[in-house]
Amino acid sequence: MTALADRLAARTLELVDIPSVSGSEDAIRQHVLSLVPSSLVVEFAGDEVFFFCPADRRDVPLVVLVGHYDTVPEQGNLPGEIRDGAVHGLGASDMKGGVAVALELLRDLEGRAPGPYDVGLVLFGREELPSEHNPLPALFAGSERIHDAALTILLEPTDGRIQAGCLGNVVARIVFRGRSGHSARPWLADNAIERAVEGLSALFRIPPRVAVVGGLEFREVLSVTRFESGIADNVIPGEASATVNFRYPPDRFPDEAESCLRALVPPGATLAISSNAAPGRVVTDSPLLRRLRVAGDLEVEPKQAWTNVSDFTANDIDAVNFGPGHTALAHRQDEHVEIAALLHAYATLERFFLGAMKEDAA
């Protein structure tokens, strides 16, 4: 491997090996903040969100790299290791590989002549928790400078492509009620599980709805992710509940998505919505995005998931997802990121920030 490849792999592994499950981020927070180059100053510091900008502002566009440093719980995938051309371990793909690329690139840019943009950095935690724990709203409320950003690039796992927009995300609970009773005399009871099976079967058969937004195809999907019922082995349950996850494209508003979900609730069941994270605006055509595409000869595709792109676009800040991680490997036990992917992301962002491309192509 080259010296840069060794450095990116080592930094990624270093971050992987610091346990940082959402809610237990003290060690990783302190470490990543210590790695931010001194040329960047703290523009905003809140509860698990930090915004850095160049000390001397120039009359050029501000582009901000954004990365979260927390992970989902481990699955026997700590500590990590480097083997077979990849960094393996918890968070390697989502998204410590992306954070490593951002930190190493910004440290390298510190000693070079400035390019055509001011480059900022947002680091934050609690990303893997429900939306009520999201620390980013404090940033938008407390910092004027973040609203100057011409483009934000979230280093989410995207397989080295630009993924525009993102899906909205509703989490809700459907409750089915019957009547409890003794399991030896089920005819005297009304089994809530039977009601749930019958009611949920129709939901399982709903095909994805395809929505084209900004020329990109998003899929609207409804999934049952949890099921709970029963209080004892010899009791017919009088209540059963299913947690459903409704992912909706950027062609729906949040209240419209909730109305759509309510219309799907089986007769006799009740729906309780616990969270609704709005979709992200689709950014596919702007001068800065065209330059980013040219810098890495990048394809643009939809983000078939929710990301914090939604937070930025809701504040009228253009945002896209672009990172070295592998979408299909996020949150998996065998999570890893290829070292070649780290190099590709680094080289793309380096060319973009230094303006090392043909202006007429951009």
Image (cartoon, rainbow, N blue to C red):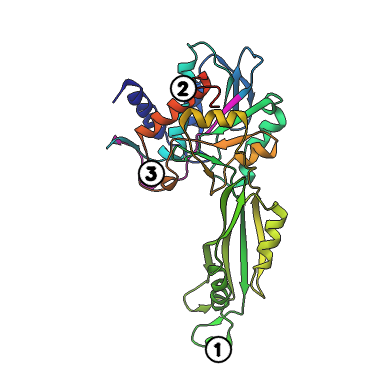
**Element carrying mark 3:** loop
Most extreme residue toward the front is 360
Please give the label number shown on residue 187.
Answer: 1
In which quadrant of the rendered image does the C terminus lie? top right
Please tell me whether mark 1 or mark 3 is closer to you in this view.
3
Please give the label number shown on residue 335.
Answer: 3
Instruction: Tell me the CA gap for discs 1 and 2.
Output: 68 Å
Residue at figure coordinates x 58%, y 88% from the top left: 188
**Element carrying mark 2:** helix
Amino acid under disc 2: Leu
Q: Which residues are magenta?
A: 63-82
Q: Earlier in the sequence, mark 2 or mark 3?
A: 2
Q: How many marks?
A: 3
Image location of residue 179, percent across then percent down: 61, 80
Horizontal side of 54 relative to 314 (left or right) equals left
Image location of residue 29, percent across then percent down: 51, 29
| Circle 2 residues within 10 Å: few <14, some 14–19, many ≥20 | some
